[in-house]
Amino acid sequence: MRRNDDLNGKIIVVTGASSGFGRGAAIALGARGAHVVLAARRGEVLEEVATRIAASGGSAVAVPTDVSDPEAVENLAAAAEEHFGPIDVWINNAAVGVMGLFWEVPLADHARLVDVDLKGMIFGAHVALRRFAARGEGVLVNVGSVAGEVPLAYQSTYSAVKAGITSLGRSLTEELRLAGLEETVKVGTILPWAADTPWWDHVGNYTGHAPRLTAMDDPDLIVDAIVDACTNPEQERPVGPKGRAAHTSHRLFRELTERFSGTLSRAELGNGARVPDTAGAIHEPVAVGTAVHGDTRARMVEEDADPGS
């Protein structure tokens, strides 16, 4: 693969790098010559990703990290600097999720989601921007969601924290302008549509049905957007035709879009196979789901072909 000169030699931290978008972005960045610092809870999976990056000619170091722990995030930054040098790009990607009627999901699961998905983003942003402001350059990439714009029924807390991530990016951009750093320190927020990653194998689920969502995107679409944002950050980037359409529709027809989204979510869930309640990987990591791509779309096809399953 032809190396991208804009990324060659860049030191890039990627959280949530053991699967899904984070894994895909880390591998792509390593192939383009970046020095990649891999963070997630599953250390053994990170080592496998690091080995794959090295085999492609790149360089990576695995730093097992729970982003809900501010001390662990500080240690992640220190490890990156010790191993490679000053950080050029920080990608806040780690996230957990939970599905179910808000009042039927255990409060501990809601709280943990806020700890990881929102507070983890804040901890990462704080660690990164302190360094970028001192050096006068750097890029912070936050992976949010279209769900932060179009709230998802049965994922209320997830939608709330993703809205917080979008708002965080807007506020940080304004603060950088006021500090005279807007030309050299950038914050970009990626807003994906739902994609078929192992996230759906990790999600907490109190709906009684296997997770489903219509017209999921290919994860590679979001991976490409994350990689591009490392050198071409946009304040907010809805990804893909469906993500852009939903984002625009909500701004023009808020109530209609929200009702359509909620009705569709309920209908899809009702078609899913019956499954027991689970906290998934919210509190502790699980062994399954270590790839970039998931198998949810394939399962949905099977369920639709055999509605009685």
Image: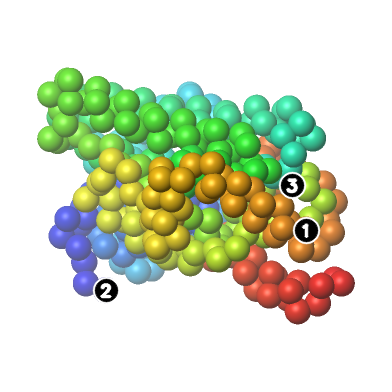
Q: Horizontally, is 262 left or right of 69 in the view?
A: right
Describe the element under mark 3 as helix, strand or loop.
strand
Q: Position of residue 126 (x, y in %)?
A: 36, 25
Q: Where is 19 relative to 280, above or below?
A: below
Q: Which residue is mark 2?
A: 1
From the image, which quarter does the C terminus lie in?
A: bottom right
Describe the element under mark 1 as helix, strand or loop.
helix
Residue at coordinates 78% horizontally, 48% vertically from top-left?
207
* Residue placed most toward the observer, 23 or 300: 300
Going by the numbered disc 1, the residue's amino acid type is: Gly
User: Are the residues at dot 3 and dot 1 in contact (C-beta closer than 8 Å)?
Assistant: no
User: Are the residues at dot 2 and dot 1 in contact (C-beta closer than 8 Å)?
Assistant: no
To which quarter of the image does residue 105 belong? top right
For marks 3 and 1, the one nearer the N-term is 3
Q: Position of residue 143 (x, y in %)?
A: 42, 44
Q: CA distance from mark 3 to mark 2?
A: 40 Å
Q: CA distance from mark 2 to mark 1?
A: 44 Å
Residue at coordinates 54% horizontally, 41% vertically from top-left?
255
Q: Which residue is mark 1?
A: 270
Inspect this view and state whether residue 284 appears: yes
Going by the numbered disc 2, the residue's amino acid type is: Met
Q: Where is 243 relative to 111, above or below?
A: below
For marks 2 and 1, the one nearer the N-term is 2
Q: CA distance from mark 3 to mark 1?
A: 13 Å
